[in-house]
Amino acid sequence: MTTVKDAFFEVARRLGLTTIFGNPGSTEETLLKNFPSDFRYVLALQEAPAVAMADAYAQATGQAALVNLHTAAGMGNALGNIESAWYNRAPLIITAGQQTREMLLIEPYLTNTQPLEIPKPFVKWAYEPARPEDVPAALMRAYAMAVQPPAGPVFLSIPMDDVDKPCPHPPEIRTVTRRLGADAINLASVIEALSTAKSPVLIIGGAVDQSGGWDDAVRLADRLRCKVWAAPAEGRPGFPETHPLYQGMLTSAIGPLCKELDGHDVIVVIGAPVFRYYPYVPGDYIPKGAKLFHITDDPAEAGRAPVGESILADPGRACAVLADHVAATDRPTPAARAKLAAPEGGSKITPDFLYHAINEVRPENSVIVQESLSTLKKLRQRLPTSHSRSFFSMSSGVLGYGLPAGVGVALAERDAGGSRKIICIVGDGAANYVIQALWTAVQHKLPILFVIPRNGAYNILKSFAHLLDTPGVPGLDLPGLDFVSLAAGYGMTAERVTESSELAAVLRNGMSLTAPHLIEVEVDPAVPPLI
């Protein structure tokens, strides 16, 4: 007899979902008993890092990932990173156990009384099967929902007594297209505008890289000889930041962003929202007289854009179609943005100096995973991304992503047979949301270099306090943190750097290690401007 559990794992196996990230509880043990030998369970010590690991693993592999969480309380722990997965467009299939069906009416201990409501609005679909034998088919549907554009997390609630019930009709394994089309007909207005523009500009989002359009975006920019900006508040780049046409990341505030686009008559946003703003700084959305086109595979993004003509199309394929069809131009190539001078070492290590030092010693094909929000602008300037799928962060603004994301990316790199160095840079405030992720890195012997810039504060909040004119806000300082001891407690080697003269040698040694290693760097606590 085929049981629900047998059929569930067979569906997962045939869909390639043989790595499960999770933190199990009692309501999940029935599903996980006699765990199949061809599956891998990546244990996180809390639900939030489990989701972030799976998110980064899915982004790095380009495939869906399976997450196993505990019932209502575990879902609550995980919700912040479920939101990040939503904005990162990570195709996660999240499962959580539910109490025994026979007792649900009387709401026993650990009942999830609202299983479909807890993850909303940050899942594309949520379901608790009406019958035990529907669980495997629900997994098939969950996969289909997660991977189709725009990709994102979905949720299944599985009563713990379902798994041993018979499943007389296991579901068929289906294929589902993961990309929309893009052709010269539905992009005709964009082709015409770009072909006749006097000063076009491209704004490229992470969905271009997610949909395989990295090289075609370069081809399009080269053909147009136009400036290229990164969309604001994106967790991954869609265009090489070392390209001479690249200008940097747009400011995520209405008025300042508009000023950065001044002088352009045609603005084309590909694979990003129009736009992600915070804080509120009033002004026009785009310069007067300019025309904006928005190419996205997300109907919700198209619906909420405040200006422009939105076109539903695959971002990567759209770049290829535009590159093939826009008219060649004799416009002079815009001047490349000025190169940053090397910072000088001083009595204090500035974040700028730290990121420059990392860039000087890192391997050319290294992967950056980051969550250092207060110094993100300097980080992106000093550590530019040259290759596809080589920079990962979160698009949500919810802290607690970076450390476990480094684990997910490193696992994906190992599974692909790669040897790129993973460098995970996380601020001291963000790191303590999910410090348990260090344990998972040690258990899997992942060669991650963790770099913790320690400024002893939530400096991003201090930057907001300056802008919002809110002095005297409590709880923004973080004295007494010791990441060397924290790392040692999880079995990881670690060291602390306080002098700029020692930094390069310590970083170079950390890059060479084949085991996880943490470097805590005491950095200048000066609060940078938000805009």
Image (cartoon, rainbow, N blue to C red):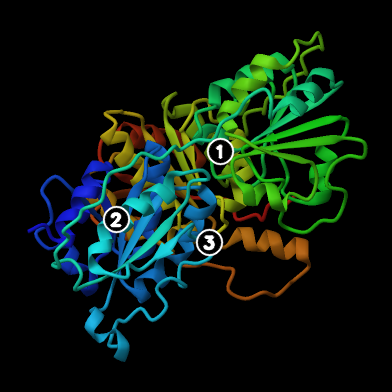
Image quadrant in which you'd find residue 168: bottom left
Asked if the residue at tag 3 contacts the one at tag 1, i.e. Cβ–Cβ closer than 8 Å, the answer is: no
The quarter of the picture where the N terminus appears is bottom left
User: Residue at point 68% right, 30% down?
Assistant: 186
Say which of 452 and 393 sits in front.
Answer: 393
Q: Amino acid at mark 3?
A: Gly
What mark, if any, has residue 137 been given in the picture? 2
Callout 1, which amino acid? Ala
**Residue 240 image point, x, y percent:** 58, 26
Q: Do we see residue 347 in this rendering?
A: yes
Q: Nearer the viewer, residue 242 or 498?
A: 242
Rounded to the nearest whole Å, what is the CA distance between mark 1 and mark 3? 34 Å
Q: Position of residue 232 (x, y in %)?
A: 67, 44
Q: Nearer the viewer, residue 351 or 318?
A: 318
Label 3 Cα crowd, 10 Å radius (few <14 / some 14-19 / many 20+): some
Where in the figure is residue 449, as x and y percent of width and height? 36, 41
Choose mark 2 or mark 1, whichever is in front.
Answer: 2
Q: Residue furthest right?
A: 289
Vertical arrangement, residue 456 with respect to residue 145, above or below: below
* Residue at which label 3 appears: 456
Q: Quadrant of residue 104?
A: bottom left
- Which mark is first along the chain, 3 or 2? 2
Secondary structure found at label 2 = helix
Q: How many marks?
A: 3
Q: In the image, residue 258 lies at what x, y percent?
A: 83, 43
* Number of residues whose C-alpha sits closer than 10 Å to that of mark 2, classed few (under 14), some (14–19) or many (20 or more): many
Q: Which residue in the structure is indicated by mark 1?
A: 207
Left or right: 421, with 223 as reference point: left
Q: Residues within 10 Å of mark 1 (few under 14, many from 20)?
A: many
Name the mark nearer the viewer: 2 or 3. 2
Query: Of the residues shown, which amino acid type is indicated by label 2?
Result: Ala
